[in-house]
Amino acid sequence: MAKKKKKQIFRIVLFAGTIISLFFVPWILVKAWLTPLPDTVQGVVNEAPRLGFDGIIVYVHQKGHKPQFYAAGWKNTEKKIPADPHALFKIASIGKLYNAVAITQLVYNNKLSLDSTLAYYFPNLAGHIQYANQITLRMLVQHRSGIPNITNTPNFWANPPKTPQDALSRVLNKPADFKPGTKYEYSNTNYLLISMLIQKVTGESSFRYIKKNILEPLGLKHTYGSIHQINMKDLMSGYYVGVDHDIKSVDYGSMVASAEDVGEFVMALNDGRLLNAKEQAIYSSLYKYNHTGLIPGYQSIAKYFKSMNTVVVQFTNTTNFSGYNWSLSEIIYHRIIKVLRKKAD
């Protein structure tokens, strides 16, 4: 009997906790979850503007089938230009996948060693980055270096750095967040250093290397190193809640690409076309195969689903300080996957 009472009390406490927690969750998230699931991907995409996004782009490609393009809302809200599924977008941290592939290729070709240290590759940083003589290239790729994150430094987003050197200077002579190899902590500084290393080893910019060795072999023509390499009319506008104008011209150092190019890159990375067997073994030991991206005005999700042999890319162009817009974008993405799984069944 005592056991039964304990179970009843536990259920009451659990229910009460659930009810209380709902008061701390923006109701728009609850609404997004509870809205009946449409029968089509376009139906889900159409929900995005009603949830507060200026615009959304979705790309779906099931291997062996024709790619599908979806969009809703605005490419540019002020000018009422409809969202274009072929528009360019700032892909933010999705760019780390391309850099991880580049490192894999250079390791395979004996241009780099995963076990060599930061101090070995950049002797001038030995006295300015703590544990530089213990941080290996492998740790940089895997976010296990302990180097502070540049994007967490004061005023990074309000006053973005103009050059890689300017960005790096913001964390020099700062104490490490932890001893190398002891923890995982996502740090954009790791990939800034990786980009600089690719340039040092190859004698060309990291993006130029990526273009020649990754993009061109895959036939991808709509991926760029920065906003300075594109016609800005082709770029989807970016919006930040509380800022009453388009912020797409602000340069945070992001790669730019179409949803189709990102999707085909992620598909090739996952289905074995991009890397040979030995390269694949190196990459598998290093980094993940899917990624998300987030900078002011731009949110992106790119994933491959093996069970459906399908890649799904989603771009949404509205962000906010509280971060619930990111949660909303994830909810929309999960709903799209549910629709696709239902169709597959």
Image: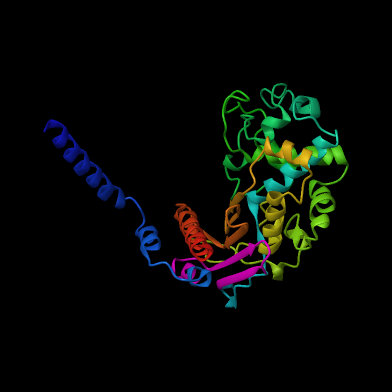
Is residue 32 shown above or below 167?
Answer: below
Q: Position of residue 7 (x, y in %)?
A: 19, 37
Looking at the image, what colour scheme do you see?
rainbow
Instruction: Name the side, left or right, on which 189 lies relative to 294.
Output: right
Q: Position of residue 124 (x, y in %)?
A: 79, 27
User: Image point 66% across, 39% down: which residue?
Assistant: 287
Q: Is residue 60 magenta?
A: yes
Q: Is residue 342 visible?
A: yes
Q: Quadrant of the N terminus?
A: top left
User: Image point 77% across, 46% down: which residue?
Assistant: 275
Is residue 50 shown above or below 19?
Answer: below
Which one is nearer the viewer's eye here, 110 or 66?
66
Q: Is residue 165 visible?
A: no
Q: Quadrant of residue 256?
A: bottom right
Q: Is residue 102 magenta?
A: no
Q: How many marks?
A: 0
Is residue 315 shown above or below 80?
Answer: above
Q: Quadrant of residue 36?
A: bottom left
Instruction: Name the side, left or right, on which 5 lies relative to 226.
Output: left
What range is drawn magenta here?
Answer: 46-73
